[in-house]
Amino acid sequence: MADKGGFAHYMLKEIFEQPQALRDTIAPRVSLEAGVVRLEDVHIGSEELRALRRINIVASGTSRHAGMAGQFMIQTLVGLPVDVDYASEFEYRNPLIGGSELTIVITQSGETADTTAAQREARAKGSRTIAISNVVGSTIAREADGVIYTQAGPEISIASTKAFTAQMAVLFLFAVYLGQERGNLGKDQVRGYIRELLALPGKLENMLRSAPDCERLADKYHQVQDFLFLGRAIHYPVAMDGALKLKEVSYVHAEGYPTGEAKHGPNALIDESLPVVIIATCDRDDSGSVLRYERNLANIKAFKQQSGRVIAIATTGDEEIRRLADQTIFVPATPELLLPILEIVPLQLFAYYMALRRGLDVDHPRNLVKSVTRE
Ligand code: BG6
């Protein structure tokens, strides 16, 4: 698994491995017929899961962005409050946690020093911990009470891609599992979520066909030195990770921001020299999503009036956004909570092609390492 398999770089190979990584992460844990999610290595009984009053998610880099998406998934499906923390900040926050909180640590490598320290602090304060990791037997996985492995295969490229989408799939699985164990979700609801999860790999396969469009975007924008990435609600973490990918591999300055916050400052930056990438998808079956969509539409119109350049991520068939934005990449219709797993793919590809067009070493960006094992 750990060679390039004919791809020019590990990053591109790992982007294209995402459908299989999702299949391997989801399939062994769901039974559509029984309407059940099974997470055998969680090792926390349903009594204890029912007694939980709060969840803390702690992680670094891209893994924290997965945690931000997981916060929406768990709060929406389970009704439990969730906090998300930078692992590197956790120790300074004097976290008020104990036996009735669960700490989820998300880490591709399972060796990140900040995240290891955060897990040890949470355990010392009496919180049970669950690790979501991509490396079997890693330090953080071994020290946790329970573990849910992403089955993404070895991720070599410093910029995390397939581990990220697999982490979000695991967080959705966990949210459904919690809802099932705590009695919030009935079997038919679980079946519905399982059906949507099982449809994801095929949809992501479709997304990969947008690679040439993303390459053309990089051709058009490769000399630009600053970008603003915007997303609302569960799409904000996607904007954050799209910006991080671009920074990591192409050294272009990019900032991820909640779309609604653009009017509190970043708007002053927006003109023809600073392109805006905006996540403007819409799940028509979700009233909150429709409301956010209408606001995104108004934002795009305003940015265009400021002579801004807009790259939109929209839902397949959305002709209005195609007309309004300068460029649009489409995502197949998907339930709101699962959209981030698809929306990030064009942003991964865009960052990859931008790095390529700028003649950089995509798999080994300067000053970065795959796992920061010391403070
Ligand atoms: C950084 C990596 O060093 O660490 C990122 O470059 C990663 O890709 C972050 O998201 C956290 O690493 P891990 O292994 O704890 O998920």
Image: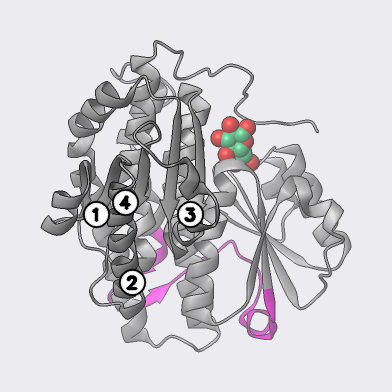
Given this view, does label 3 or label 2 mark the residue nearer the observer? Answer: 3
Tell me which segment is drawn in magenta: 27-54
Mark sitting on residue 342: 4
* Quadrant of the snapshot with the C terminus: top right
Left or right: 245 as drawn, with respect to 112: left
Residue 3 at x, y percent in the picture: 40, 19
Given this view, does label 3 or label 1 mark the residue nearer the observer? Answer: 3
**Circle nearer the N terminus (3, 2):** 3
Q: Which residue is mark 2?
A: 289
**Circle nearer the N terminus (3, 1):** 3
Q: Secondary structure at mark 1?
A: strand
Q: Secondary structure at mark 4?
A: helix
Taking depth in this image into account, of 145 and 225 the one nearest to the observer is 225
Mark sitting on residue 314: 1
Taking depth in this image into account, of 10 and 254 the one nearest to the observer is 254
Residue 235's place in the image compared with 185, above or below, is above
Q: Secondary structure at mark 2?
A: helix
| Residue 157 seen | no
Q: Which residue is mark 3?
A: 262
Could you tell me how far apart the alpha carbons at marks 3 and 2 are, in whole angstroms?
A: 19 Å
Could you tell me how far apart the alpha carbons at marks 2 and 4 are, in whole angstroms?
A: 16 Å
Tag 1 and tag 4, C-beta contact below 8 Å: no
Residue 204 at x, y percent in the picture: 26, 48
The amino acid type of the residue labelled 4 equals Leu
Could you tell me how far apart the alpha carbons at marks 2 and 1 are, in whole angstroms?
A: 12 Å
The amino acid type of the residue labelled 3 equals Ala
Residue 228's place in the image compared with 72, above or below, is above
Label 1, ligand 1: CB separation under 8 Å = no
The amino acid type of the residue labelled 2 equals Ser
